Amino acid sequence: MGGEQEKWILMVTARTPTNIAVIKYWGKRDETLILPINDSISVTLDPSHLCTTTTVSVSPTFDQDRMWLNGKEISLQGGRFQSCLREIRARAQDVEDKKKGVYIKKEDWQKLHLHIASYNNFPTAAGLASSAAGLACLGSACRSLYGGFVKWDMGKEDNGSDSLAIQLADEKHWEELVIIIAVVSARQKETSSTSGMRDTVETSALIQHRAKEVVPKRVVQMEDAIQKRDFPSFARLACTDSNQFHAVCLDTYPPIFYMNDTSHRQDYQLCREMESCRGNTSGPNAVMIARNRQTAALLLQRLLYNFPPQSDTDLDSYIIGDKSILKDAGIKDMKDVEALTPPPEVKDNIPPAQKSKGDVSYFICTRPGGGPVVLSDETQALLDPLTGLP
Amino acid sequence: MGGEQEKWILMVTARTPTNIAVIKYWGKRDETLILPINDSISVTLDPSHLCTTTTVSVSPTFDQDRMWLNGKEISLQGGRFQSCLREIRARAQDVEDKKKGVYIKKEDWQKLHLHIASYNNFPTAAGLASSAAGLACLGSACRSLYGGFVKWDMGKEDNGSDSLAIQLADEKHWEELVIIIAVVSARQKETSSTSGMRDTVETSALIQHRAKEVVPKRVVQMEDAIQKRDFPSFARLACTDSNQFHAVCLDTYPPIFYMNDTSHRQDYQLCREMESCRGNTSGPNAVMIARNRQTAALLLQRLLYNFPPQSDTDLDSYIIGDKSILKDAGIKDMKDVEALTPPPEVKDNIPPAQKSKGDVSYFICTRPGGGPVVLSDETQALLDPLTGLP
């Protein structure tokens, strides 16, 4: 680091995926170190559909650490942010940028401040692990650090040194899976995951049995189902684990309700007979995993029949992500949606008036995807290279 | 029993109460003998508000066993009915009716047929244990055989000989309790208790832990709370046990949902801060137990504010049972309902448009009550004394 008058800014931008649990993490054994009471398994989602972009910049002109989430400045006073920042500084090494003629020595990091900007291309805090994606660039939410199928091993050590993410298989291993997310409500969850899981650990009479007896067996079965691409076993395990997560939430005092009638209905009526299953979200949004594109197209037809968009919504903003599934389903425009015939099981049962127009904000179609990447294209940075501000 | 031409009919009519569980029975250890996997505890409800009236008649002119439930003839072919009828015949003793000059010997019962009529003064199969009430006169659903507070001891014997109802305290022991039932929907439950609990025992990974580890401790605590009339402990145990029942239903595969958004909302928004708690129903109906009449009047005000009747419903048919609670709440007519001021916690939060008009069919106000009684007044019989038909 040179003289007092230096005005340089260095920055790096990374894109991180989000993930959906198929065996759920719910409950911590250490609140400060964020160590879980059981292993969990997730599928990383394709970052070209759902991702968080984060730019971190450093400059001797910054007089404090600052962060912007989705364009809005947020406080970094929370313990989790402070832990992340402390770890980043402790782990940072010597950095040289020859082009800018900047050399930062390892010990300089303790004096330098950071500006961080993070942007989710999906609703924040609606149960889609946006906090996981947002923090993955900063070293937490370890399951989002790999693509494909990832296990977070709870570890045994008190200091958390063996509580690590492990890639079970990459995103090419089982690429025919299609994931459809129904975003039921964009409002914030009533109970945050952090306080919800604390309440569950403190008050549920069932959670320890789940963590110690039920999940360990399911994790072994799920790893096996993933290795063998055994969809029926995968689907059954994901569904039963998701239900059990909601069960221990209900067994919490006061009870936590993350599902509502719309998510029940989607789940119950749509998934049972399809070759698809529900993934885990701690929110009312429903995540459905279809065996392949053909099943996904049928599922999407059924979803659109039961949950048509409101009249002023255009199809292009109602189905986002991998829109080619829509094509496979033979749907080009709203006329095709209106022309959908009722699926066999609802024939004569659900009059059109009971169709749930507007209950779903939009659907996201996606697939298993890769892990975080550093973006070399500087135009994707979220901070101005001259000011270090958004 | 005399000659062939005898035309006599003997009949007896009994009134049986229903009950609401505060520690729930869910899961059988023997399907045929109907033996539970855990003890349960209930409060018997005042039969002057909720009851089943059953008339049993016998005559040499009857050529088969027949039964009418709420005026409609039903089949007696089911195993449970057959077991009851077999037990009734086996236990029947010599009966003499001097006025009619009839003498039935113990062994004659094997040849005589019965006509049975049963009438519930509340919706059938909507989670209010109407089957319990309906069968109590016939020897099953043992918790309804006593008034007040009743434990059904699961017993240990394979033959069920020690699986018995025990009265913990009579209805005078804690008579200030008020029970308010919100009948959310009169439609039949989607899953019957019988098949639902079978599915839970077969598929839930949590039910055995509940039955063996959680409930036995709760039963001891609940007995203690009842003896001491310790309302906070009583309420907390009843609520957590009700939630855990819904939790193991969710943990069933496929999952069982007995609650809906309306029951959630009532529960969550209304009960938490009141001196009241939820009882257990396997249906969407909410059962609330208030500490005393004063609390019940406040609770009823709040319920009527949040769940007003539809414009064409009159108050007299919207609040049934013990209508004096309505008087305590200062409500005489619909104008008083419309004039209710929002409870403090919803002020400015719930605009009038979001109030849930019509979500509740009606409310029942009641209290702990006595056990079954034989009605000596023959005009209350449900069968014609001359024809033996309804």
Image: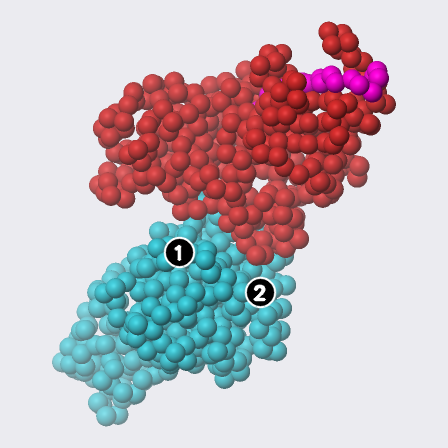
Chain colours: A cyan, B red
Tell whether position A226 is magenta.
Answer: no
Quarter of the figure with the C terminus of chain B: top right
Observer-nearest residue: B383 or B267? B383
Q: Residue at x 65, y 48 (%)?
A: B198
Kind of element beneath mark 1: loop
**Image height of B351 relative to B5, above or below:** below
Quarter of the figure with the N terminus of chain B: top right
Q: Residue at x 56, y 47 (%)?
A: B191
The residue under label 1 is A351
Q: Quadrant of residue A70?
A: bottom left
Kind of element beneath mark 2: helix
Q: Position of residue A238 (x, y in %)?
A: 54, 65
**Image height of B49 relative to A343, above or below:** above
Chain letter for mark 2: A
**Image height of A360 relative to B13, above or below:** below
Q: Position of residue A219 (x, y in %)?
A: 59, 66
Tell whether position B18 is magenta.
Answer: yes
Tell me where the magenta segment starts and ends, as one range. Answer: B1-19
